[in-house]
Image (cartoon, helix red, strand yellow):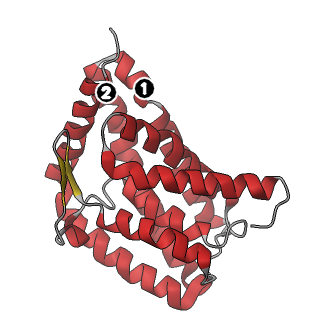
């Protein structure tokens, strides 16, 4: 069996649509709760860290269940070569979920946001992840304000990671650096793969991955970030 990017792209589109058909009723709940949590984070910072951590731990357990465990079964049915291409996603999702669980018991996230150019740099991507406009594979975007409440945010790892990674990058290297680097890797490798397959909503995700990767390199080589 040979790999066909068009088959992978169409299969990905069906995978996403199938999830929304079953779990789409959760979308407005994810949006409303997350918006409240983001406002509370901006106001109270680390004082609501436990609430922030528990909320997103539960969220990533859900994402790993569908995109990790069920995702393996889904792509295996299409073909082992497509599963081989996809397999990095469940591995990274498992590691990210485990790190969230670790964060619950040993908190290290720094949510006391520093308002400045770094927040301004990621804010458009954070908003994009929260909005995540509808996209019809092979056709284009459908920009609709209703997606601010009914998009795939919370249901898909990419837009959800976009929001959280944008937020925790503001204080980097303060905070949970392991979670930061895992999410950065997810943005680069998984976001890059989905864009290469024709899923264009993840272009800002790849940009975020490059940005956070560069921040990590600068810190590693002793540069002020």
Nearest the viewer among 222 and 103 is: 222
| Mark number displayed over residue 85 | 1
Q: Quadrant of residue 134?
A: bottom left
Q: Quadrant of residue 102?
A: bottom right
Q: Are marks 2 and 1 in contact (CB under 8 Å)?
A: yes
Residue sitting farthest toward the top: 1
| Mark number displayed over residue 74 | none
Residue at 45 percent across and 40 percent down: it is 192
Rounded to the nearest whole Å, what is the CA distance between mark 2 and mark 1? 9 Å
Quadrant placement of the N terminus: top left
Residue 6 as seen in the image, left or right of residue 184: left
Residue 140, image x, y percentages: 19, 48
Residue 64, image x, y percentages: 41, 47
Q: Is residue 41 visible?
A: yes
Residue 73 as seen in the image, left or right of residue 116: left
Q: Nearer the viewer, mark 2 or mark 1?
A: 1
Disc 2 target residue:
75
Q: Is residue 61 visible?
A: no
User: Where 132 falls versus 116 (above or below)?
Assistant: above
Quadrant placement of the C terminus: bottom right
């Amino acid at each position: 069996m040979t790999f066909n990017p068009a088959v992978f792209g169409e299969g990905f589109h069906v995978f996403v649509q199938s999830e929304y058909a079953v779990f789409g009723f959760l979308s407005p709940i994810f949006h409303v709760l997350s918006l409240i949590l983001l406002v509370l984070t901006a106001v109270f910072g680390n004082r609501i860290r436990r609430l922030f951590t528990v909320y997103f731990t539960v969220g990533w357990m859900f994402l790993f269940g569908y995109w990790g465990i069920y995702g393996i079964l889904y792509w295996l049915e299409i073909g082992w070569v497509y599963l081989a291409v996809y397999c990095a996603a469940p591995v990274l999702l498992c590691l990210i979920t485990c790190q969230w669980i670790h964060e619950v018991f040993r908190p290290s996230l720094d949510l006391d946001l520093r308002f400045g150019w770094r927040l301004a740099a990621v804010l458009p991507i954070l908003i994009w992840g929260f909005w995540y406009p509808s996209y019809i594979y092979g056709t284009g975007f459908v920009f609709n304000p209703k997606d601010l409440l009914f998009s795939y945010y919370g249901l898909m790892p990419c837009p959800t990671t976009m929001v959280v990674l944008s937020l925790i990058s503001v204080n980097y290297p303060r905070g949970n650096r392991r979670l930061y680097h895992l999410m950065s890797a997810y943005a680069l490798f998984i976001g890059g793969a989905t864009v290469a397959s024709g899923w264009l909503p993840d272009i800002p995700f790849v940009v975020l991955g490059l940005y956070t990767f560069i921040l990590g390199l600068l810190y590693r080589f002793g540069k002020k970030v």
